[in-house]
Image (cartoon, rainbow, N blue to C red):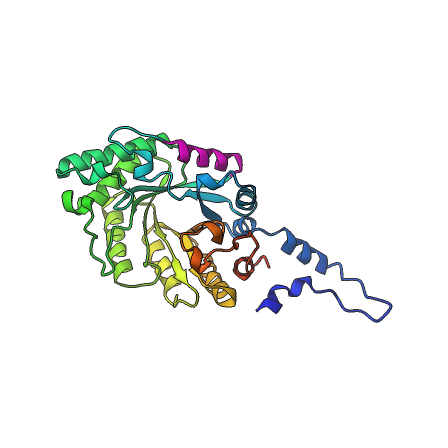
């Protein structure tokens, strides 16, 4: 595989003492390879290639340089979650999220909001609400406060995150327990009221292939579209391992797209290394390319150094920001290498 990746850079052989110059037609190919970045390669296919970003790392030169050179979109890792934005009821703070949005705007990067309603990283006061009607009011107010603050600056919002169990049933979160099945619909309606321009998404993990969990999500999305609930996209997190079976990924993305929603790869990382990791990254990119409504791919981080799975070295840049074989495989899948 490596020989193929670097084939374009090999010198053209010539006779001893009289080397034959490279043909003019070969020069643009070398220049294209040298100039290609993840973002430019994706853009040539009409896609966005993004990364999850931590505000605390933007001050690191190598981190910011790599982010701004390679990625055309960002997702705040934690800065827009409930515990960060509304630590006490009715008291909002947006310092970290604002910094990421400002950085993105100054570098022409699209912003994905993440996430308005999730069972994890909740401040204690939310879980302490005992009344369903009171929790619904708090949820609506939170969505209005956060999505309203960023109105017009967010391309996609992950409105609800990880609301399903592996068997396709609803997760027993505080929202499910207090409000019931309607809380997801209520969240999407509140998000639409707060920001009429952002595309509203449901996001989850282990839904990449067709399975019980993705079937549960599919049934919900189909119902929402039939009843006019404002859902515009579905996010597939894609926390994977090298060599993982992705035999139904493309068909799964396509069946959701057929419901009339965009599909996004939202948190891609692939535990492993070398050619096996590279192959899996390439499979994901090719599956997205095969589905016209797959509009973006986001890796969950920039460098292995700061990955939540750092021991599995799952990203495209190593701890020293060197490009890994998986990086070249992504360019190759986009047709830029």
Q: Residue furthest bottom?
A: 15
Residue 213: x %, y % from top left: 26, 59
The total of numbered circles placed on residues is 0
The residue located at (37%, 42%) in the rendering is: 78
The foreground one among 172 and 13 is 172
Q: Is any atom of residue 290 visible in this view?
A: no
Q: Quadrant of the N terminus?
A: bottom right
Residue 249: x %, y % from top left: 38, 62
Magenta region includes residue 107? yes
Q: Which SS does the magenta portion mostly show? A: helix
Residue 15: x %, y % from top left: 83, 71
Q: Residue furthest left?
A: 131
The foreground one among 152 and 111 is 111
- Placement of 7 over or under 303, stated as above or below: below
Stretch in magenta: 94-108
Q: In the rendered view, does 248 fall on the left or right side of 185?
A: right
Q: In the rendered view, does 5 fall on the left or right side of 253?
A: right
Q: Residue furthest top?
A: 91
- Placement of 248 over or under 91, stated as above or below: below
Q: Quadrant of the C terminus?
A: bottom right
The residue located at (52%, 60%) in the rendering is: 326
Q: In the rendered view, does 61 fall on the left or right side of 312?
A: right
Q: In the rendered view, does 166 fall on the left or right side of 148?
A: left
Q: Is any atom of residue 87 visible in this view?
A: yes
The residue located at (55%, 48%) in the rendering is: 70
Magenta region includes residue 261? no
The residue located at (23%, 39%) in the rendering is: 124
Res. 24 image quadrant: bottom right
Res. 87 image quadrant: top left
């Amino acid at each position: 595989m490596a020989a193929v990746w670097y084939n374009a850079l090999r010198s053209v052989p010539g006779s001893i003492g009289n080397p034959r110059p490279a043909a003019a037609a070969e020069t643009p190919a070398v220049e294209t390879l040298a100039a290609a970045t993840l973002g430019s390669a994706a853009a040539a296919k009409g896609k966005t290639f993004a990364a999850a970003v931590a505000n605390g790392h933007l001050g690191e030169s190598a981190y910011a340089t790599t982010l701004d050179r390679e990625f055309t979109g960002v997702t705040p890792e934690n800065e827009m979650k409930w515990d960060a934005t509304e630590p006490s009821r009715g008291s909002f703070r947006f310092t970290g999220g604002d910094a990421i949005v400002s950085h993105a705007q100054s570098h022409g990067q699209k912003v994905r909001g993440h996430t308005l309603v999730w069972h994890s990283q909740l401040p204690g006061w939310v879980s302490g609400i005992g009344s369903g009607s009171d929790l619904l009011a708090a949820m609506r107010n939170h969505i209005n406060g956060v999505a309203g603050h960023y109105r017009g600056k967010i391309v996609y919002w992950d409105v609800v995150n990880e609301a399903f169990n592996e068997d396709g049933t609803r997760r027993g979160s505080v929202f499910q327990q207090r409000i019931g099945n309607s809380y997801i619909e209520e969240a999407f309606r509140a998000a639409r009221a707060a920001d009429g321009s952002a595309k509203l998404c449901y996001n989850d993990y282990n839904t990449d292939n067709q399975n019980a969990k993705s079937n549960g999500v599919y049934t919900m999305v189909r119902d929402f579209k039939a009843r006019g609930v404002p859902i515009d996209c579905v996010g597939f997190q894609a926390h994977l391992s090298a060599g993982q079976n992705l035999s139904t990924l493309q068909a799964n993305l396509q069946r959701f797209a057929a419901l009339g929603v965009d599909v996004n790869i939202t948190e891609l990382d692939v535990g492993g290394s070398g050619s096996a990791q590279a192959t899996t990254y390439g499979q994901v990119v090719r599956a997205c390319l095969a589905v016209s409504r797959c509009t973006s791919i986001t890796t969950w981080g920039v460098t292995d150094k700061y990955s939540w799975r750092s021991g599995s070295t799952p990203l495209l840049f190593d701890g020293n920001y060197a490009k890994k074989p998986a990086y070249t495989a992504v360019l190759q899948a986009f047709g830029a290498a």
